[in-house]
Amino acid sequence: MRQADTVILVLSHVLNRGVVDLLNEIQAHCSGEYKVTLLFDNTKGTFDRRVKDTDCFLFDLQSIEDLRYPRQSFAYDDKRRQENPHHKDFNFVPGSIALPVLLFYQKYPSYQHYWVVEYDVRFTGRWNAFFSHFRDNPADLLGTTLTRQEDIPTWYHWPGLDLLDLPIDKRDYIRGFFPIYRISGRALAQLHAFYKRGVKGHFECLGPTLLRHAGLTIEDIGGAGEFVRPENVNRFYRNSAKAGALSPGTLVFRPVMDRPGKESGMLWHPVKYSPFWRILGRKAYRLARRVLRAIRGR
């Protein structure tokens, strides 16, 4: 029986075999129980042929601008994009990931919960089993790698956090990692109000910090941090919360993976689709480097 109060949003700005496989898998596993909607960035017209699809919600830079959040910078300029090869196809500034979800919420505010799955997340199990595990969980924000500022004081995005005159002590600053997360309708309403007021920052710290300050509940879906339930410790992912790249682990910032690992029932990120010939080329390059290092070390 479909859970009418929950929607699963699959977020992507690219369309390739890996994304198509992910979409098909989530729809096959979950469409009988959940509403599954494809949340596509169509700024470059990548998804023009899906405009009339009822299971698609297309957005672009203009539609995000129409939200009229006064201090949310989201357009990714060419210079910044070129400085990071991993972001060459991005249209939005990293850290603005909540904006298309807020846009969707403005049009469809009746859901109690909104799951968001980025295009480069994989799960080595049945997706419906993962989502159903949290069906009765009351948290307003379910995310990953929730960590206090005092435990990662040198994190790159802390300086960009501007909470205006909100009385939030630094010890209550929370950083998360959100390639996959669930957020409640009331949490989105609260974020909308805060954004209209003019707060600013990367969503990974802005979101959990604001919501916890507002009295809403945040929880980690796995890992080994302070905000995870005992029964979920390292259950759905592992990573190194205090490391800049969050690695080693299954759900990390870097390195990029060609495919998910073999351990079942785990979330993996980032898994980027690559043609088979490119995978072989990378493996040959890594092998050649190891051989050269071994020769030089003799």
Image (cartoon, grey):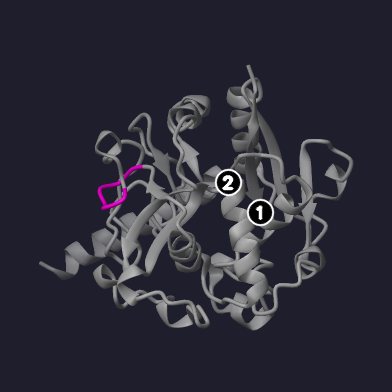
- Which of the 4 image quarters holds residue 153? bottom left
Residue type at mark 1 is Val
Outermost residue on the top side: it is 1
Q: Between marks 2 and 1, how big is the CA–CA gap?
A: 8 Å
**Is 79 above or below relative to 251?**
below
- Count residues near mark 2 (Cα–Cα under 10 Å), then give few for <14, some for 14-19, many for 20+: many
Question: In the structure shown, which secondary structural element does the residue marked by tag 1 occupy?
Answer: helix
Which segment is the magenta one?
A: 222-227
Say which quadrant the N terminus sits in.
top right
In-front residue for pair 20/295: 20
The picture places residue 251, in percent across and down from the top left corner, at 39, 49
Tell me if label 2 and label 1 are in contact, CB under 8 Å: yes
The picture places residue 88, in percent across and down from the top left corner, at 62, 68
Residue type at mark 2 is Val
* Sequence-first tag of 2 and 1: 1
Q: Give left or right: position of 193 versus 264.
A: right
Numbered label attached to residue 190: none
Residue at 44 percent of width and 35 percent of height: 137
- Residue 13 visible in rendering: no
In-front residue for pair 224/169: 169
**Is 197 above or below relative to 27?**
below
Residue under numbered circle 1? 101
